[in-house]
Image: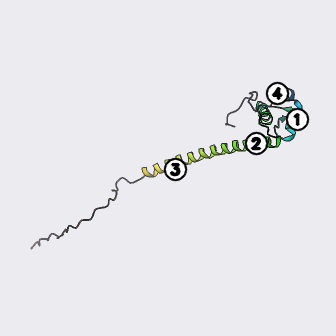
Amino acid sequence: MDGRRRNPYELTEETPVYVISVAAQLSGLHPQTLRQYDRLGLVSPDRTAGRGRRYSARDIELLRQVQALSQDEGINLAGIKRIIELENQVAALQSRVAELQAAVEGAAAAMQQREAAVHASYRRDLVPYQEVQQTSALVVWRPKRQQSSD
């Protein structure tokens, strides 16, 4: 969830509202086909307290996708089940990648802030060391003679 309170009466694409006869009409399939897909685990609708099936808009879309893969592409139901599982796995992995990217970006920002704090704490009275080029010049130093106070 996104942390906000949701209206309990708000309908989303995951809200199970359609009975099997309506879901069959919306998907263009026979109710018995929907029951078979449920038994095979292709499309698993929510259940009421009395064990009646309730389909969501997402379930209806998935039923249409199963039908298209079966009729248009000629894929058998076991293959379709595997495709759905892999698509769900890809979606979960994409979500995890997004979470990890956000975590990395947050860690990078925190690191930059700590680095800036370290740089801000540098003593400003220090002079940075600079390499002096060596020459072949000879410098002679002679101390000043102290004058005697006689």
The residue that label 1 is drawn on is: 35
Tell me if I can see residue 48 in this picture.
no
The residue that label 4 is drawn on is: 28
Q: Residue at x 56, y 45 (%)?
A: 105
CA distance for labels 2 and 1? 20 Å
| Quarter that holds the N terminus | top right
CA distance for labels 1 and 4? 14 Å
Among numbered discs 3 and 1, the one appearing first in the sequence: 1
The residue that label 2 is drawn on is: 83
The residue that label 3 is drawn on is: 111
Q: Amino acid at mark 4?
A: Gly
The percent position of residue 19, horizontal first and vertical second, equals 85, 28
Quarter of the rendering containing residue 135? bottom left
Q: Are marks 4 and 3 in contact (CB under 8 Å)?
A: no
| Quarter that holds the C terminus | bottom left
Among numbered discs 1 and 4, the one appearing first in the sequence: 4
Q: Which one is nearer the viewer's eye here, 12 or 63? A: 63
Q: Amino acid at mark 2?
A: Ile
Mark 2 Cα-neighbour bin, 10 Å: few <14, some 14–19, many ≥20: some
Residue 115 sits above or below residue 31 on the image? below
